[in-house]
Image (cartoon, rainbow, N blue to C red):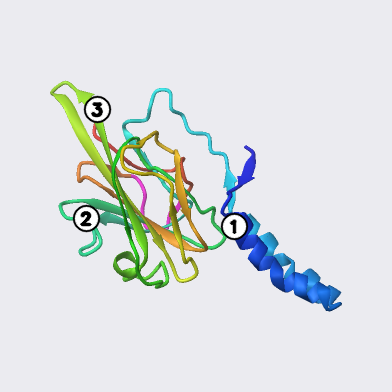
Amino acid sequence: MPTTIDREAWTAAAVGAVPAVLAAAFGRRRTALALAALPVGIVAFFRDPERSIDHTPAPDDVVLAPADGKVMHAGPGQPGVAPPGDWQQVSIFLSVFDVHINRTPYSGTVTDVTYRPGKWHAAYKFESATENERSDITLEHTVSTPAGPVARTVVFRQIVGLVARRVVTRVKAGDVLRTGDRIGLMKFGSRMDVFVPLDVELTVSAGDRTVAGQTVLGRWPR
């Protein structure tokens, strides 16, 4: 699958290239070559690989990973972290080496996007989920059942970490998404939380690796 570079890369890479340019201007060629690794690394961070996601038929029965990374928590919603109500929670930590393009874990209509400024604790720490800068996205999807239409709600949260300093959310209320669609990114190390109802059977455990748009986090009852 081809890999592209997200548009957020170019400004960051230009800033990262300044030390190398200055070193070259002062005749420090070896130093300039070493410093050139910084903008190259920044561009690599913003890589956006294509992912094969089967939408025919739409995977209404599965919740997919919204991010590449390592599962830190999979189980009951953590007090003070999960939205009000009864939820199950999957938390994924993204290191600076992971792809940081985020994808929607489920299909449906975006009913709410809430951005909250905050601190920059390391994303693997518990307090990052409640105190860090983040963006909460709520999706609703109606499925047909023998008993009639049933509304399903999924909430997922972009959280920046110690190195990440900005969350980028490219969806808004009213947008209709398909499972695996790109929704934004988080810059330089971060965390994604997914909250699903109690009747969803989780299929990942702490320590598992996830791939955005491919790893199944949970399944709805048929």
* Neighbour tally class for label 3: few under 14, some 14-19, many 20 plus, Cα within 10 Å: few
Q: How many neighbours does mark 1 have within 10 angstroms: few (below 14), some (14-19), or many (20 or more)?
A: many
Nearest to N terminus: mark 1 or mark 3: 1
Q: Does residue 25 show up?
A: yes
On the picture, is 3 further left or further right than 159? Answer: right
Disc sitting over residue 181 in the figure: none
At 20% across and 63% down in the image, what residue appears?
A: 79
Question: Would you say residue 154 sits in the magenta stretch?
Answer: no
Q: Earlier in the sequence, mark 3 or mark 2?
A: 2
For the residues bearing labels 3 and 2, Cβ distance under 8 angstroms: no
133 above or below 46? below
Instruction: Please name the amino acid that badge 2 sits on.
Output: Pro
In terms of secondary structure, what is the magenta stretch mainly?
Answer: loop
Q: Secondary structure at mark 1?
A: helix
Query: Residue placed farthest to the left in the image?
Result: 147
Residue 83's disc is: 2
Name which residue lies at 24% across and 51% down. 88
Name the residue rendered at 46%, 49% in the picture.
184
Query: The magenta stretch spans which residues?
Result: 203-209
Q: Amino acid at mark 1?
A: Phe
Amino acid residing under circle 3: Val
Name the quadrant containing residue 28.
Answer: bottom right
In this view, 21 is above or below 210: below
Q: Report which quarter residue 30 is drawn in.
A: bottom right
Residue 126 shows in the view: no
User: What number of labels is visible?
Assistant: 3
Quadrant assignment for the N terminus: top right
**Image spot of residue 152 (x, y percent):** 23, 37
Q: Quadrant of the C terminus?
A: top left
Number of the label disc, if any, that sits on residue 143: 3
